[in-house]
């Protein structure tokens, strides 16, 4: 070979190289032959095997823990639900089959399309649930068209079921499918597309306790998606049950009382913070979330002007109005700016800082002592008290008595409310506090806002003569992970305010209910109810006009019973309810009387 | 500095074939694994980039220099393999060393060291027939890492050292009787291994090559599923990312050792022919490069690199179509995995290195 002549002679090893390469080429040809045999000659055989021999991994959903009231009445359970699913790869003509399925299931084909679009990333053979909670009629209709519509299948799934529908919906919360964004956020590593999760209330708060761990099943399916037997199975572990502090009867009565109104009711045990009832109205049916809304239903629900999804008891912010006079009275006595005997003259109006402030009683109350001022809820008396105390001492006592901070209830979303101070005004509102505002705050108006639950806890602190509680819904659980919140503990109010001062204010509350006073609608014979009403001017006139209502005040009542050794606190708020004494107090009276009936035979007072 | 003439002599066509094959792998890896977390296709792209960089770095150093230091490379590799055995429990998982961000498989890189050290040995050997001394020395040089890797235990990679030895011996001139003798010896070693070394699952795999449907849920399962995947692909295949066998997570190691089954199922016989044709062109170009070598060592290097890649291809494809036991050898360039990819790129780098320095005066 010419080109190698200047170098060593490599022709021998090069020819050996070529020989080996020839062998390699030959072997590649052999492989081509075998592939041809498998893919072309035996194609039918392997195609059939592939069709008959598919596995599908499916999740066996772990039953979620039950939620019961304090007497083991089931509020949330699981029931079997029939789901209709579409297997996309079995569709012969996608649009036509969606049309037919839509007709069969009575679902608009566009809704089917948007639903399927959500699951685009799943493999084509995967069943996508398009309608659930089918009734027996639906199931039999689908089964009868099995052969015409191989893309439509029926599966059984355990589903959350709330036997009493909207009852306590705001406490229990609802469940919803995880969105794709949430799945990507890696906050839920165990979850997959289509899984449900507790969205609000107890369902969300105790998600990790209620949720079990799902099992898995590997099954062989044929090309129609029908199971041809399991190959392996891992059993699910059920979630833990929860017992709530709610009392079914009180909860039901509270919900009935609010029917047709907008507002919230809280019944609380002041001794340990157990929430016996927590109702917010208008409400919604949490079962609707489980069965997957149609987009139209969902839009209707979230755009309704009266916000049924909002839990007014923990998220509604209202001026406390006259309820705040309790704080004022306690604060004034404690700071020593007045004594129980201090009286002021009410002429129906008074001037402060060059501006007139009115009492709700046009003609005025005349000369009043503290207990009567509470009993008749006289504004002018408390204007004077407020001017003597000043905003800083007012704010200090409001905080001591549970306002302006979260109560710590074990459901998410609680609001903090606002106890205004000059510092707040400067830092948040960017304006100076002016003295006239102190006068407004003295009767629970101005920037001061509270939630109904804060008012209930506030009342419990007064009832306990200063001892605070953390309101809670969890009574017991078989899970070691969670423990109910602590019972009554001696709060800062008990250290800073003497117990006999509480007694002086409570005397006024007792008079207000049991003698001629604003709270007399809440009176229950032989139960010693102590209460206070409030009627707050609306913060925003515009909203009221938009809703087309006559401009009525929010109606408040809060109270406890019995006067000594209190066992129950009831707080009622009715939006646009008119005077507190006329609307809220009688509702509370019914709850006090039901509580007494249930717990107090014979009556002790 | 590298000479301009050297750059002109780089075989860009070979690099093109190499990268084309690798990118084809990324496409198939995507199809086989896009529905599981891990983003294997992106990672493979990173591996390709890194391997390409390593390949170009290798071109900067004359292969003669590399061969001078070949015993150091070899020694280092053997040392790493040796310490991996007792300390394996702490730092490695079988054949893998875990580093902070990725894992490396030193047994793959051992192939490159073995190629260099054998080329060095035989380059000084100019007779037409191999001597007993040379045969024994080379056997020892390959046997040591072979045993160390087989003990890890990674039989697949260990076995792929064997063709390097046999190939270099054939090139050096082995008598026909000697070739037969070696094959008989290998056969006897196989029987001994069957009785003393092989684990039960490996025996199962071997025996199910002959009878794949004997135990469809056990060891024969993988082979049968792989055959079903390829067979059901037919002539045109089921389409990209639409193979029911591979998408159903039915195939084991879909993006690594069984990536060829995914090609068969989704692109059919036509796809397989195309891929094998690409490989044939690539391998032919590798072997033909031997004629461009300026010396004996270069021929040995090119020959062994060609053999290394051919062997992996032949065994892997034979394995997934069910005519060879499952030994865990990846499809070169196409299977997911950085170490194997890097070893093959370094091998091709050596070939390019030899080819571009074919004029003795440079």
Image: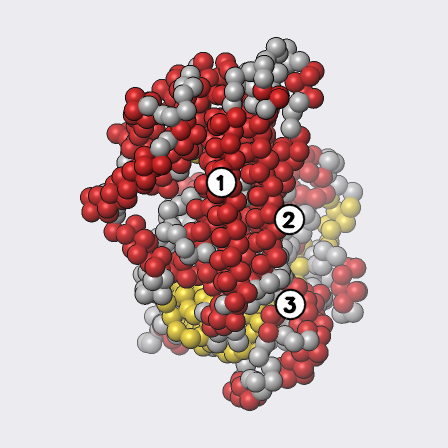
Q: Quadrant of the N terminus of chain B?
A: top right
Do callouts 1 and 3 mark residues in contact (Cβ within 8 Å)?
no
Is B282 drawn above or below residue A521 in the view shown?
above
Specify whether disc 3 shares its chain with disc 2. yes
Q: Nearer the viewer, residue A198 or A200?
A: A198
In the picture, measured across the screen, residue A587 lies left or right of residue A61, that is right
Residue at 53 percent across and 54 percent down: it is A32
Indicate the chain on which mark 3 is placed.
A
Indicate the chain on which mark 2 is placed.
A
Q: Point out residue A532 in the picture as x, y percentages from the top left corner.
A: 55, 61
Q: Does residue A595 appear anywhere in the picture? A: no
Q: Point out residue A252 in the picture as x, y percentages from the top left corner.
A: 49, 75
Label 2: few (<14), some (14–19) or many (≥20) C-alpha neighbours in 10 Å: many
Residue at 62 percent across and 33 percent down: it is B14
Specify whether disc 1 shares its chain with disc 2. no
Residue at 36 percent across and 36 percent down: it is B176
Indicate the chain on which mark 1 is placed.
B
Q: Nearer the viewer, residue B202 or B357?
A: B357
In the picture, measured across the screen, residue B11 lies left or right of residue B69, that is right
Tell me the number on the disc at residue A448: 2
Q: Quadrant of the C terminus of chain B?
A: top right
SS category of the residue bearing label 1: helix
Q: CA distance from mark 3 to mark 2?
A: 45 Å
Label 3: few (<14), some (14–19) or many (≥20) C-alpha neighbours in 10 Å: some
Residue at 32 percent across and 64 percent down: it is B215
SS category of the residue bearing label 2: loop
Q: Which residue is mark 1?
A: B310
Do callouts 1 and 2 mark residues in contact (Cβ within 8 Å)?
no
Q: Which residue is mark 3?
A: A115
Q: CA distance from mark 1 to mark 2?
A: 82 Å
Q: CA distance from mark 1 to mark 3?
A: 50 Å
């Amino acid at each position: 070979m010419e080109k190698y002549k200047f170098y060593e002679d490599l022709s021998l090893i090069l020819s050996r190289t070529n020989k080996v390469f020839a062998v390699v080429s030959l072997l590649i040809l052999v492989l081509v032959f075998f592939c041809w045999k498998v893919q072309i000659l035996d194609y039918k055989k392997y195609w059939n095997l592939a069709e008959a021999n598919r596995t599908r991994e499916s999740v066996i959903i772990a039953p979620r823990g039950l939620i019961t009231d304090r007497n083991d009445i089931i509020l949330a359970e699981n029931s079997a639900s029939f789901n209709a699913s579409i297997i996309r790869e079995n569709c012969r003509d996608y649009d036509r089959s969606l049309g037919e399925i839509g007709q069969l299931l009575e679902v608009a084909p566009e809704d089917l399309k948007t639903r399927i679009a959500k699951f685009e990333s799943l493999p084509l053979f995967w069943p996508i649930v398009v309608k659930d909670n089918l009734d027996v009629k639906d199931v039999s209709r689908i089964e009868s068209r099995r052969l015409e519509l191989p893309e439509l299948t029926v599966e059984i799934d355990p589903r959350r079921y709330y036997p009493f529908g909207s009852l306590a919906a705001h406490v229990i919360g609802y469940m919803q499918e995880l969105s794709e964004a949430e799945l990507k956020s890696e906050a839920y590593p165990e979850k997959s597309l289509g899984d449900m999760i507790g969205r609000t209330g107890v369902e969300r708060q105790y998600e990790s306790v209620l949720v079990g761990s799902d099992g898995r099943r590997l099954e062989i399916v044929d090309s129609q998606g029908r199971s041809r037997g399991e190959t392996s199975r891992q059993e699910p572990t059920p979630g833990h049950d929860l017992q709530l502090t709610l009392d079914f009867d009180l909860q039901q009565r509270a919900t009935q009382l609010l029917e047709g109104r907008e507002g919230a009711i809280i019944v609380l045990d002041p001794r340990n913070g157990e929430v016996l009832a927590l109702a917010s109205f208008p409400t919604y049916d949490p079962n609707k979330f489980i069965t997957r809304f149609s987009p139209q239903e969902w839009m209707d629900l979230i755009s309704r002007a009266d916000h049924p999804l909002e839990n007014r008891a923990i998220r509604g912010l209202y001026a406390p109005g006259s309820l705040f006079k309790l704080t004022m009275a306690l604060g004034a006595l404690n700071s020593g700016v007045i004594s129980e005997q201090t009286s002021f003259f009410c002429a129906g109006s008074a001037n402060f800082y060059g501006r007139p402030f009115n009492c709700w009683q046009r003609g005025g109350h005349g000369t009043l002592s503290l207990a009567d001022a509470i009993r008749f809820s006289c504004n002018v008396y408390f204007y004077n008290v407020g001017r003597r105390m000043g905003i800083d001492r007012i704010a200090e006592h409001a905080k001591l008595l549970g306002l302006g901070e979260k109560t710590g209830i074990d459901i998410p979303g609680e609001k903090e409310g606002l106890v205004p101070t000059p510092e707040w005004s400067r830092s948040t509102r960017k304006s100076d506090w002016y003295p006239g505002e102190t006068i407004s705050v003295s009767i629970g108006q101005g920037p001061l806002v509270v939630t109904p639950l804060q008012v209930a806890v506030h009342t419990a602190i007064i009832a306990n003569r200063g001892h605070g509680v953390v309101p809670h819904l969890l009574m017991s659980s078989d899970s070691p992970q969670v423990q109910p919140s602590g019972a009554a503990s001696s709060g800062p109010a008990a250290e800073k305010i003497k117990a006999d001062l509480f007694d002086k204010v409570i005397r006024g509350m007792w008079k207000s209910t049991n003698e001629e006073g604003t709270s007399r609608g809440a009176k229950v014979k032989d139960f010693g109810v102590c209460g206070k009403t409030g009627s707050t001017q609306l913060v925003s006139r515009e909203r009221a006009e938009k809703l087309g209502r006559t401009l009525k005040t929010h109606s408040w009542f809060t109270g406890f019973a019995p006067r000594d050794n209190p066992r129950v606190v009831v707080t009622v708020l009715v939006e646009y309810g008119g005077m507190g004494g006329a609307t809220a107090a009688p509702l509370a009276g019914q709850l006090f009387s039901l509580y007494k009936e249930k717990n107090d035979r014979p009556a002790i007072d | 500095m590298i000479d301009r003439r050297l750059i002109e002599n780089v075989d860009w066509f070979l690099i093109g074939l190499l990268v084309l094959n690798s990118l084809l792998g990324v496409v198939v890896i995507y199809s086989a694994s896009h529905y599981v977390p891990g983003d294997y296709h992106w990672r493979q792209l990173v591996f390709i980039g890194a391997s390409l960089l390593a390949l170009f770095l290798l071109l900067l150093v004359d292969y003669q220099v590399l061969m001078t230091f070949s015993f150091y490379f070899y020694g280092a590799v053997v040392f790493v393999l040796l310490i991996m055995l007792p300390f394996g429990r702490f730092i490695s998982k079988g054949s893998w060393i875990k580093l902070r961000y990725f894992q490396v498989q030193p047994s793959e890189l051992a192939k490159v060291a073995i190629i260099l050290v054998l080329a060095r040995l035989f380059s000084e050997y100019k007779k037409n027939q191999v001597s007993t001394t040379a045969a024994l020395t080379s056997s020892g040089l390959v046997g040591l890492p072979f045993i160390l890797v087989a003990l890890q235990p990674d039989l697949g990679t260990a076995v792929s050292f064997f063709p390097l030895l046999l190939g270099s011996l054939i090139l050096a001139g082995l008598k026909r009787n000697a070739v037969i003798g070696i094959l008989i010896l290998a056969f006897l070693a196989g029987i001994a291994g069957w009785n003393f070394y092989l684990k039960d699952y490996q025996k199962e795999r071997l025996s199910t090559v002959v009878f794949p449907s004997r135990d469809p849920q056990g060891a024969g399962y993988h082979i049968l599923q792989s055959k079903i995947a390829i067979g059901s692909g037919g002539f045109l295949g089921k389409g990209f990312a639409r193979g029911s066998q591979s998408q159903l997570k039915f195939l084991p190691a879909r993006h690594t050792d069984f990536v060829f089954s995914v090609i068969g199922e989704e692109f059919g016989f036509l796809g397989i022919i195309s891929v094998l044709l690409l490989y044939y062109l690539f391998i032919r170009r590798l072997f033909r490069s031997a004629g461009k070598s300026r010396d004996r060592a270069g021929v040995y290097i090119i020959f062994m690199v060609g053999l290394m890649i051919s062997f992996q291809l032949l065994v892997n494809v034979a394995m997934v179509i069910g005519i060879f036991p499952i030994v865990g050898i990846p499809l070169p360039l196409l299977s997911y995995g950085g170490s194997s990819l890097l070893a093959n790129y370094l091998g091709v780098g050596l070939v390019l290195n030899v080819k571009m320095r074919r004029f003795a005066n440079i």
